[in-house]
Image (cartoon, rainbow, N blue to C red):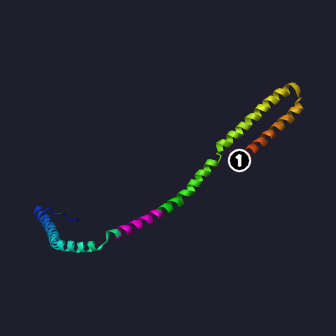
Amino acid sequence: MALKKFDVPDIDNAISEAKDDEQRKEETAHAEKIAYFLEYFTKKAPDILKNMQGVVSQLDAHKFAAVVSEELRKTADDMVRQFKSKIEPMIQRAESADRRTSVPNLMAHIILVTLVWLFIFLLMVIYANTKIQSDELTGLILIFFVCLIVSIIAVIYLTKKYKW
């Protein structure tokens, strides 16, 4: 058996009015507290200001400024030291990067040497067609490839040693 909800508008209105009244009372009490504190502050404010003027007049503005200036100078020096300690390694890396040879430069040198040797090979083949027998041609081709490989190794070595 299910419980039925009874809809009684008068009871619902009475409950909502009671909640609204309670909320209004809380807001009124809170506003009265704020008004009391404001009134208390306005009564005590002249005394507070008089006491603060006495303390402020005892402070020496030049001493305060000198202490603050010294602390700022120390902080700035520390920040400069920290900045330099972090930046100097990066500057050294950038300077050393200027002296390095990148892979594309190395590849350009290797390609240049290879093209030179291919041109020599072309001239050698043209010469061999007119003067040399086929068994001697095999030896020349072998010598060509050995010279090409030695030249590429020399280019790699010189590139790394002299940082072209």
Q: Residue 41, how many percent across, how many down?
A: 18, 71
Residue at 31% in and 71% down:
60
Q: Residue 25, how many percent across, how many down?
A: 13, 69
- Looking at the image, the residue that sits furthest to the left is 10
Look at the image and tell me in which quarter the C terminus lies: top right
Q: Quadrant of residue 155?
A: top right
Residue at 61% in and 49% down:
97
Q: Nearer the viewer, residue 71 or 10?
A: 71
How many numbered circles does the render carry? 1
Q: Does residue 102 appear left or right of residue 125 in this picture?
A: left
Q: Residue 131, how many percent across, how many down?
A: 88, 26
Per the image, the residue denoted by label 1 is 162
Amino acid type of the residue that numbered disc 1 sits on in the rendered structure:
Tyr
Q: Residue 65, how many percent across, how many down?
A: 35, 67
Tell me the chief SS of the magenta region: helix
Look at the image and tell me in which quarter the N terminus lies: bottom left
Q: Secondary structure at mark 1?
A: helix
Q: Is residue 111 above or below residue 95?
A: above
Tell me where the magenta segment starts and ends, as one range. Answer: 63-77
Residue 64 lies in the magenta stretch: yes
Crowd tier of the residue under label 1, counting other residues whose Cα lies within 10 Å: few below 14, some 14–19, many 20 or above: few
Q: Does residue 76 appear left or right of residue 105 in this picture?
A: left
Q: Does residue 151 appear left or right of residue 31 in this picture?
A: right
Q: Nearer the viewer, residue 164 or 106?
A: 164
Q: Quadrant of residue 143?
A: top right
Residue at 72% in and 49% down:
161
Q: Quadrant of residue 55?
A: bottom left
